[in-house]
Image: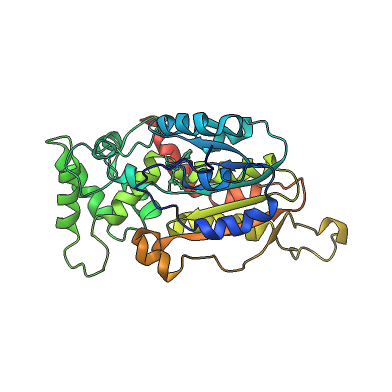
Amino acid sequence: MSATINLEKKHFPVLLDEIIKIISPRYGGTFLDCTFGQGGYSEKILENSKNKVIAFDRDINSIKLSKKFKKHFGDRFEFNHNRFSKIEKINSNNLKAVIFDLGYSTDQIFDEKKGLSFNFKGQLNMKLGLNSFSAHEAVNKLDKAELAQIFKFFGDEKDARRIAQSIIKKRNKNYLSTTDLVEIINKEKKNYNYKINKSTKIFQSLRIFVNQEVSELIYGLINAYNLIPIDSYIIVVTFHSLEDRIVKFFFKNYSEEKKVSRYVPISKNKNKFFELFNKKAIVPSSDEIKKNPPSRSAKLRYAKKIKNGANFEEFLMKFKHLLEIENIGKKL
Ligand SMILES: C[S@@+](CC[C@H](N)C(=O)[O-])C[C@H]1O[C@@H](n2cnc3c(N)ncnc32)[C@H](O)[C@@H]1O
């Protein structure tokens, strides 16, 4: 049997060589691929016959591909159609690394039914899978203040309030579609001279909200730490600044000897649960960006777990306001 599965993939696995360089010294164990997608990382890891992969993906379309993997790799591959915040449920010995490649695969972006992009006409959707509400419901049911918060905090959108106001006015007459939303944004952002599309930030904020990406990431990271044994790695590829801020804080805050009061005995001063290897994030080479332009915003951070017993209260407090905004979704 050949080592590779030879799939016709449209998705380039981002920073794949860099990830393999990090994990290959640890080959001969189980790797948790939290974002299976088009299977690029899993396939590469399984090329080595000593490795096993446990994969997760929330998209129902990934089940079909996972079956091909299962047929080809047998017991060395296991798939869970689930959100990666649920990885605590897996039972694995010999876990060497947990890998998250956040964002969306090319197939998902070009899937009109998913409605992730402002380039397609049709109904707003944005559900990756296993969601409880769509962007359509959010835009058509939430009030002005709630929409403005989502746009501001998840999209860093300067004109959040004005756009939210305009949505409320317009939707009284009709349910808003993707095209209506793009029209509203274009109208409200008149003197705009940035390089990115006017709709980029609003659409990003809705994708984050609909897929509850902040809580997925925060609980995914905490559960990964609780799951892995000492000496295992957590590796994360992010695609926008909000994700990167969360990952950076998680690793840095729990890697340093923190300066606390001089009255606290030294033994209680230790807050070092990870060993960090790169202060700065690893980014794609110019060659990779040339071959796959969407990789230009990718950032890779990773760390090794060196101690049990971390308490993540400070991490949760730091991003409490974002978790509260995601909670608005509970009423939909
Ligand atoms: C960028 S793609 C991964 C590509 C993959 N590394 C490859 O090489 O083909 C991200 C994938 O993660 C999945 N995903 C995103 N958030 C998730 C979550 N919270 N739980 C499980 N899967 C998630 C998406 O459905 C998508 O398939």
Q: Observer-nearest residue: 268 or 207? A: 207
Extreme residue in the left direction: 173
Relative placement, left or right, of 316 versus 114 is right
Q: Residue at x 52, y 30 (%)?
A: 70
Q: Is residue 23 visible?
A: yes
Kindly identify the residue that appears in the image at 55 percent across and 34 percent down: 73
Q: Nearer the viewer, residue 62 or 49?
A: 49
Residue 83, given in percent of the width and then of the height, sits at: 50, 35
x and y, in percent, of residue 126 in the image: 32, 39
Q: Is residue 320 above or below residue 131?
A: below
Residue closer to the observer: 274 or 188:
274
Q: Assign the C terminus to one quadrant of the image.
A: top left
Residue 68 versus residue 152 in the image, above or below: above
Task: Count up the numbered dots.
Answer: 0
Find the residue positioned furthest to the front. Answer: 1
Q: Quadrant of the N terminus?
A: top right
Q: Position of residue 165 (x, y in %)?
A: 22, 48
Q: Is any atom of residue 80 visible in this view?
A: no
